C-alpha cells in the first residue's frame, strides 16, 4: 500500500494560537495543510478568508491545499493563489462552468481540484477527468468539522478509481471528513491518495504522533 498524502485541516486547530499550530504541522509528517474556506451561502457556516490564509502561508513550510466551499469561486481563485495556495479545489455543485474554472486554476500554476458532496455521483466527472488534478470526495456534508464519516464513501472511491484508471488519467483522490485511524487504511486500500483530517489530528493529545500514525497506517 502506498503511503498517503496527509493534509491536516486547520479548521479544527486552535485559532487563537494559529502560528503555533502551523509550526507544529511544519515539524510533523504532514505533507500539506488543508484550508477550509466557507462562505455561509454554499455551506451553512463561515470559517475564514484571504487574510487568515495569508497569515498561515507566512509560517507554513508545507503546501497549502485550499478547499473553496463558496459560491462563485471564480471570483476568488486568484486571491487565494496570491495568498499562497498550491492547490485549489472548487465544488462541482457551485460551478456551472467547471471546465473553465479548472483552466483558470491551472493557468495560475496551481493544482486544480474538484470537490463533490456526498450525494453527487462520481460519474459526473468522467468528461473532465483529464483536467482534474485532485478529486476531493466529501465523506461528510460540507460545512462543519467533527462529523461522522459516511460509509458509502468507500464505494465512491472504488468507482472513481476505476474511472481514473480507465481514462489513463493521473488524478489523485482526496477524502475529506471524519477521517480517522479506523477508516484510513480502508480508504487507502480502496484507492485514496490524500487524507484530510481535522478533528482527529487537532483534538488528539499528541497531534504529531497522530499524523505519523495516519501516514503509516
Ligand atoms: O471540509 C471540511 C468540512 O466541510 C473539513 O475539512 C472536514 O470536515 C475535516 O474535518 P474533520 O476531520 O473534523 O471531519
Image: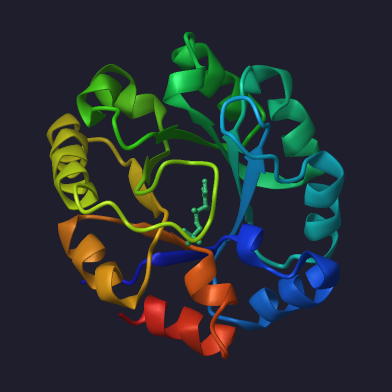
Quarter of the figure that contains the C terminus: bottom left
Residue 60 in the image, given as x and y percentages of width and height? 75, 65
Quarter of the figure that contains the N terminus: bottom left
Q: Is residue 213 left or right of residue 199?
A: left
Above or below residue 30? Residue 158 is above
Residue 14 in the image, given as x and y percentages of width and height? 74, 70
Scheme by which the image is coloured: rainbow
Q: Is residue 192 left or right of residue 155?
A: right
Q: Residue at x 74, y 36 (%)?
A: 80
Above or below residue 191? Residue 85 is above
Instruction: Using the rendered view, name the quadrant where residue 104 is placed.
Output: top right
Q: Residue furthest top?
A: 96
Front in this rendered view, residue 168 or 117: 117
Residue 83 in the image, given as x and y percentages of width and height? 80, 43
Q: Residue at x 70, y 45 (%)?
A: 47
Q: Is residue 28 left or right of residue 19?
A: left
Front in this rendered view, residue 204 or 211: 204
Instruction: Using the rendered view, name the quadrant where residue 59 is placed.
Output: bottom right
Instruction: Using the rendered view, name the quadrant where residue 148 is placed.
Output: bottom left
Q: Residue at x 66, y 83 (%)?
A: 27
Above or below residue 132? Residue 9 is below
Amino acid at each position: 500500500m502506498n503511503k498517503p498524502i496527509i493534509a491536516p485541516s486547520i479548521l479544527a486547530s486552535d485559532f487563537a494560537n494559529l502560528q503555533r499550530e502551523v509550526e507544529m504541522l511544519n515539524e510533523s509528517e504532514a505533507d500539506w495543510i488543508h484550508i477550509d474556506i466557507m462562505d455561509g451561502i454554499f455551506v451553512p457556516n463561515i470559517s475564514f478568508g484571504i487574510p487568515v490564509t495569508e497569515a498561515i502561508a507566512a509560517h507554513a513550510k508545507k503546501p497549502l491545499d485550499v478547499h473553496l466551499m463558496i459560491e462563485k469561486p471564480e471570483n476568488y481563485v486568484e486571491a487565494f493563489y496570491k495568498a499562497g495556495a498550491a492547490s485549489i479545489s472548487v465544488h462541482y455543485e457551485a460551478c456551472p462552468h467547471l471546465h473553465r474554472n479548472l483552466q483558470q486554476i491551472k493557468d495560475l500554476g496551481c493544482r486544480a481540484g474538484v470537490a463533490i458532496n456526498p450525494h453527487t455521483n462520481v460519474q459526473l466527472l468522467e468528461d473532465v477527468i483529464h483536467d482534474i488534478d485532485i478529486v476531493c470526495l466529501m465523506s461528510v456534508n460540507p460545512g462543519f468539522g467533527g462529523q461522522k464519516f459516511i460509509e458509502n464513501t468507500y464505494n465512491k472511491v472504488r468507482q472513481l478509481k476505476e474511472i481514473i484508471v480507465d481514462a489513463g488519467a493521473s488524478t489523485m483522490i482526496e477524502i475529506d471528513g471524519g477521517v480517522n485511524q479506523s477508516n484510513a487504511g480502508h480508504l487507502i486500500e480502496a484507492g485514496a491518495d490524500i487524507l484530510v483530517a481535522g478533528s482527529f489530528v487537532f483534538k488528539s493529545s499528541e497531534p504529531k504522533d497522530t499524523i505519523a500514525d495516519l501516514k503509516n497506517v
